[in-house]
């Protein structure tokens, strides 16, 4: 901030710099900035999770390791599916969308924790290291999907 400007004058300058887009400019902006479906991210997580399971099974030759990696991947994919479905359903006001975002994120976190707590009962002899690897690799698919999004 310039030392001669007060916060009030800085706000006035910012407001004066704002120029709404015309219909044509807005359409051009939308062409350059395509929307990205959350379902693509979930699909990327499923595919990366499957690849992680196959690699774990191939490298270890132990089904228990592959099951643990698979459960780790599912601990990311299932909550992501619930989150995506919840966000896709609720289309309302901006405030409602924000509350929905945080609400579904909380559901996602709680579901992930519940799945981790249930892991020893669902996967007898679970390898926690393999499960953690499955989770981390599957979570990183989110970034891969964003990097590979259309035109980038």
Image (cartoon, rainbow, N blue to C red):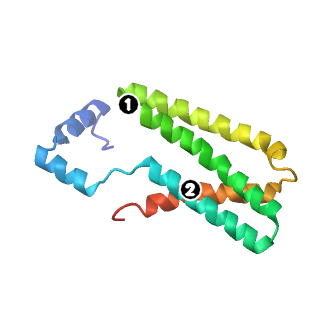
Marker disc for residue 58: none
Q: Nearer the viewer, residue 44 or 100?
A: 44
Q: Residue at x 18, y 47 (%)?
A: 26
Question: Do callouts 2 and 1 mark residues in contact (Cβ within 8 Å)?
Answer: no
**Is label 2 in a helix, a strand or a loop?**
helix
- Residue 128: quarter of image: bottom right
Q: Which residue is mark 2?
A: 45
Q: Which image quarter is the C terminus in?
A: bottom left
Query: Residue 116 lies in what quarter of the image?
Result: top right
| Residue displayed at 49% across by 34% down | 86
Dividing the picture into quarters, in which one does residue 132 lie?
A: bottom right
| Image coords of residue 82 (percent x, y) | 56, 38
Q: Characterize the local packing of mark 1: few (<14), some (14-19) or many (20 or more) Cα atoms within 10 angstroms.
A: few
Estimate how packed mark 2 is, as few (under 14), some (14 to 19) or many (20 or more) residues with alpha carbons within 10 Å.
Answer: many
In the image, is 19 to the left or to the right of 7? Answer: left
The residue indicated by pointer 1 is 91
Residue found at x 15% / y 50%: 25
Q: Extreme bottom residue here?
A: 59
In what element is the residue under mark 1? loop
Vertical order, 82 against 148 (above or below):
above
Residue 120 in picture, x, y percent from top left? 84, 45
Is 132 on the left-hand or right-hand side of 6?
right
């Amino acid at each position: 901030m310039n030392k001669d400007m007060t916060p009030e004058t800085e706000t006035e300058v910012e407001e004066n710099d704002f120029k709404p887009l015309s219909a044509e400019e807005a359409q051009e902006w939308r062409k350059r900035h395509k929307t990205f479906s959350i379902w693509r991210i979930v699909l990327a997580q499923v595919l990366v999770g499957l690849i992680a399971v196959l690699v774990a099974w191939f490298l270890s030759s132990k089904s228990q390791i592959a099951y643990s990696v698979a459960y780790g991947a599912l601990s990311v994919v299932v909550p992501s599916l619930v989150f995506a479905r919840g966000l896709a359903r609720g289309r309302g006001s901006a405030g409602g969308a924000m509350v929905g975002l945080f609400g579904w994120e909380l559901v996602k976190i709680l579901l992930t924790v519940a799945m981790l707590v249930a892991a020893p009962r669902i996967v007898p002899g679970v390898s926690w290291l393999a499960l953690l690897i499955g989770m981390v690799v599957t979570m990183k698919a989110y970034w891969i999907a964003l990097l590979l999004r259309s035109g980038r």
